[in-house]
Amino acid sequence: MEQPRRITDSFPRRRRRGPGRPPGRLKKDKKDKDKVQVKVRDCPRSPSQPPPDPALLEMLRRFDLSWEYGPCTGITRLQRWERAQELGLSPPGPIRDALLEHRDNPDVAYRWVWDGMGG
């Protein structure tokens, strides 16, 4: 009797690249890490823009964390608000007003992502 074929029989087997290292993961250089940090620090903000009000940022954070208005990945907060409005989800009006007022401030326009490092 013949053994049943498995889907893994169609693909060649690959060996690991060293002891204890899973395949496909390469050791990252410190240089690459420094380049990423520089890009994050060079976020476009004009020197004349004051930092946004903490109460405003808290209101926007609650909007970000509210799943009733749909996912927020890959779009601005204003795009998310408008999409929720088109779908009849009744997003809060003060959010839209704040987003339009601070349209040029990236701290307000884009969702803040927690990086796990405390800031």
Image: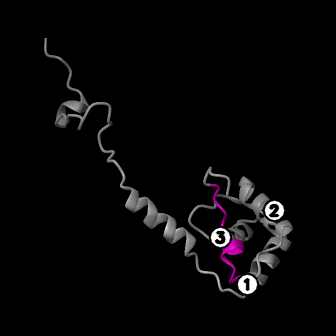
> 108 or 46: nearer the eye?
46
Q: Earlier in the sequence, mark 1 or mark 3?
A: 1
Q: Quick one: label 2, few (<14), some, or many (20+) residues within 10 Å?
A: few
Question: Which residue is labeled 2 in the image?
Answer: 58
> To which residue does mark 3 refer?
110
Per the picture, the main secondary structure of the magenta-coloured stretch is loop
Residue extending farthest to the left is: 1
Going 32% across and 31% down the picture, which residue do you hit? 20
Disc nearest the viewer among 1 and 3? 1
Task: Residue under label 1, please give it.
Answer: 49
Number of numbered discs: 3
| Vertical order, 2 against 20 (above or below) | above
Q: Given the image, on which type of amino acid does mark 1 rest?
A: Gln
Q: Which residues are magenta?
A: 103-114
User: Is residue 64 shown above or below 43?
Assistant: above
Please state which of residues 62 and 39 is positioned toward the viewer in this rendering: 39
- First-in-chain label (1 vs 2): 1
Location of the C terminus (image quadrant): bottom right
Q: What element does badge 1 sit on?
A: loop
- Quadrant containing the N terminus in the rendered view: top left
